[in-house]
Amino acid sequence: MRFDTKLIHAAQPPDPLTGAVNVPIYLSSTFAQDAPNRNKGYVYSRSANPTRTVLESALAALEEGSVGLAFSSGLGAMTTLLAAVPSGARVVADTDLYGGSWRLLEHHRRTYGVRTDYVDFTDLAAVRAAVGASPAPTLVYGESPTNPLLRVVDLAALAGIAHSRRAAFVVDNTFATPALQRPLPLGADVVLHSTTKYLGGHSDVIGGALVVRAKARGERLRWLQNALGAVPSPFDSFLVLRGLHTLGVRMRAHAEGALAVADALAGSRKVVRVLYPGLDSHPQHALAARQMSGYGGMLSVDLRGGMPGVRRFLRSLRVFTLAESLGGVESLVDHPASMTHASVPRAEREAHGVTDGLVRLSCGIEDPADLAEDVTTALRRI
Ligand SMILES: *Cc1c(COP(=O)(O)O)cnc(C)c1O
């Protein structure tokens, strides 16, 4: 099956009991047993729930992994992943990360003595040096495109570097989704998702996922999923599944809107730079063209005029709503320095490009002309 067909059919046969074309929402915390330890595969819904199982199998098929695991949030997925990293171990991570991911890595440094070294993953020589240092890292952790700077990193090359020291390469694929990029066949070991974003797609659910390439690693993480308990409810699992069905058409519409907005912003003298992998001017445009099958719905823009300019721009938008999060059908705008990345200290933020003038746009699936018009009008008000 091709990808858009898989979105609807992979691991989702009609319900064997009733023929329902959608998996029922199994609102049951526990399951009757025929005799002690004789059951139909379900015992207790923290360990496994039939609605969640369908979601997990679908995610594994879409990312081309062997084990899929669903969580109550993206950070719940990351917490479970990091619980497998022993104290004293080392992580190498990209400098440009979702703020909450950075905060969690720093918590593990303070509390469990897991040190994270941050390097720019677009600089492969720097990554090689960091991965080569002692002790060998347990995890190499990054995103592509990154949040909020939309850098694209070479996933196959990074997997090779990680594996040269037997480290696991983990890719947060939230921005690209498997519709545009599949890190596991490129060599990554684990894919992480905030399903809150594009996979859910309608801004109505918080969720996360891990998809694992090797079965043994997947089963160890499944053990931790049950032991730690950050699992999604059956209803939330259903919402993410329902979102998945339209992921293909939504990602094409998101990208169409983002390109229209990027073009509208790019010509303005009130703009320092537009960060969108689909523009020829993007530093990793060629890599993005090779590694992805589309450029996605996210872009960032560096506005002239600092905070006052940013405030006027945000106040003037009519279609874009000022809110955290991304990946829903409605367009959202975020000011990373004061919102999603406020947990990162100013000096660190600014050193790698998250300045006060930076605005992040999540282009929804409204008419691209309305999105372009909205930013053009708001620019005029600066
Ligand atoms: C939102 C987000 C997360 C965290 O996911 P939650 O579902 O909010 O816990 C992780 N990574 C990226 C890239 C995100 O955008």
Image: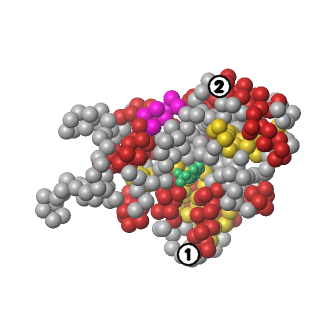
Q: Quadrant of residue 365?
A: top right
Q: Residue at x 73, y 52 (%)?
A: 337
Question: Contact, CB < 8 Å: mark 1 with mark 2?
Answer: no
Circle 2: residue type: Pro
Circle 1: residue type: Tyr
Q: Residue furthest front?
A: 315
Asked whether residue 78 appears in the rendered view, the answer is yes
Q: Residues within 10 Å of mark 2 (few under 14, many from 20)?
A: many
Q: Which mark is residue 368?
A: 2
Q: Residue at x 41, y 65 (%)?
A: 228
- Cα–Cα gap, marks 1 and 2: 47 Å
Q: Residues within 10 Å of mark 1 (few under 14, many from 20)?
A: some
First of labels 1, 2 by sequence position? 1
Q: Which residues are magenta?
A: 243-251
Q: Quadrant of residue 41?
A: bottom left
| Residue that numbered label 1 is attached to | 112
**Left or right: where does residue 95 sit relative to residue 220?**
right
